[in-house]
Amino acid sequence: MSEIVEELQNVNENVERVNSALSEFLFKSTESPRTEPQDVSALVASAITRFGVIVIIMFFAQSLISLYRYALRMSSSYKAKALTLVLAAGHEEKLEIFSKFSSTDHIGMGREAKSVSEEIAKLSDLIKAIKPV
């Protein structure tokens, strides 16, 4: 019987150690950690890096989309010119008529590129309109 009592005391001590370790772990994890200045600067640097990567990816995507549109426009233009030559079959009067119908000059390429100086001029005009000098 004394062996069973000793075994139960050992189990009870083990349970108490596990409870104290668990409560210590839980209370430490719920406390708000104090951030050091290095931690804040690391977070700011990480956020700036992530934002920069997103901006660069968007820039490259926009550039690739513009190149894709340009390539499609050029492809359709060359196909139209080839079709005009095939349909005309050596007749100059037909060549002129078919070239008017198959022209792709009236199709826009999307948003036009604006020069930086024009944008700066518009921005300065807006600033002057808001705040007279």
Image (cartoon, grey):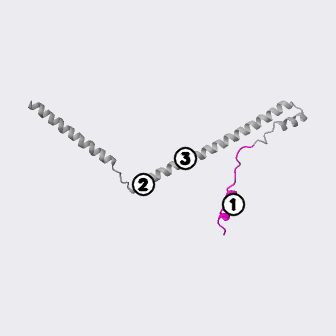
Side of 55 relative to 109 (left or right): left
Give the left or right position of residue 83, taking residue 12 as reference: right
Against 126, residue 113 (above or below) is above
Crowding at mark 3 (Cα within 10 Å: few <14, some 14-19, many 20+):
few
Q: Which residues are magenta?
A: 108-133
Residue matched to label 1: 121
For label 1, the SS is: helix
Mark 3 and mark 1: Cα distance apart in space = 29 Å
Amino acid type at image mark 1: Ala
Disc 3 to disc 2, C-alpha distance = 21 Å
Residue 127, placed above or below residue 110? below
Point out the tag, 3 or 2, that comes first from the N-terminus: 2
- Label whose residue precedes the other's in the sequence (3 or 1): 3
**Disc on res. 54:** 3
Q: Secondary structure at mark 2?
A: helix
Spot occupied by residue 7 in the image (x, y as percentages of width and height): 14, 33
Q: Please tell me which residue is depicted at 70% across the width and 52% down the height of the picture.
A: 114
Relative to 28, does residue 97 appear above or below in the rendering?
A: above
List the residue tagged with mark 2.
Answer: 40
- The amino acid type, in three-letter code, at marker 2 is Val
